[in-house]
Image (tube, rainbow, N blue to C red):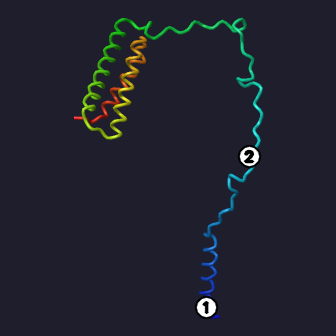
């Protein structure tokens, strides 16, 4: 055999060997619907449902409930907190009022409604004298309202 024929044969064998290695081989799976459902293990005996309920006579003495945050606050801290709440709710309410007079896009309507909901929650927390929650809701309302772009 000539050198050219040998070279062609070797190249043909090399190409054949390389191309077979790249052929995708995907195993045939079984559809999930036709697989059997595995049995569930029984619940462990120490789960909450299996524990006997304690009666008040057998309940260990519980510690005193923690004091509310507002009872721990100094009058000055309470005043600062109320000042922040008023500033945040005023800012958020002003932004919502500006946008209510406009035709809004759906995402803007969603932001306005969420802001109004946060303001309602802040006012409800103030009525319950939960300053920490009122401050949190007012801050969230202000931050959300700051994303509104209503001239």
Element under label 2?
loop
Using the image, determine if residue 139 lies above or below residue 109. above
> Which residue: 75% across, 38% down?
40
Tell whether 147 sits left or right of 20.
left
Residue 83: x and y, percent?
31, 14
Judge the density around disc 2: few (<14), some (14-19), many (≥20) Cα neighbours within 10 Å: few
Residue 136: x and y, percent?
40, 21
Quarter location, residue 19: bottom right
The residue pinned by badge 1 equals 5
The residue pinned by badge 2 equals 37
> Which residue: 68% across, 55% down?
31
Mark nearer the N terminus (1 vs 2): 1
> Which residue: 38% across, 30% down?
114
Q: Give the Cα distance between marks 1 and 2.
A: 60 Å
Element under label 1?
helix
Which residue is the extreme one toward the bottom? 1
Judge the density around disc 1: few (<14), some (14-19), many (≥20) Cα neighbours within 10 Å: few
Tell whether 19 sits left or right of 143.
right
Using the image, determine if residue 138 lies above or below residue 62. below
């Amino acid at each position: 055999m000539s050198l050219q024929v040998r070279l062609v044969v070797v190249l043909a064998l090399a190409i054949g060997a390389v191309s077979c290695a790249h052929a995708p081989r995907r195993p045939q799976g079984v559809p999930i619907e036709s697989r059997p459902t595995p049995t569930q293990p029984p619940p462990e005996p120490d789960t909450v449902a299996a524990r006997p309920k304690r009666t008040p006579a057998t309940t260990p003495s519980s510690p005193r409930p923690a004091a509310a945050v507002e009872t721990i606050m100094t009058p000055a801290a309470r005043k600062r907190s109320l000042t922040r709440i008023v500033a945040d709710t005023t800012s958020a309410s002003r932004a919502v009022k500006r946008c209510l007079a406009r035709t809004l896009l759906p995402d803007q309507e969603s932001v306005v409604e969420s802001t109004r909901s946060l303001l309602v929650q802040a006012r409800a927390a103030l009525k319950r004298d939960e300053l920490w929650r009122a401050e949190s809701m007012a801050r969230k309302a202000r931050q959300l309202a700051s994303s509104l772009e209503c001239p």
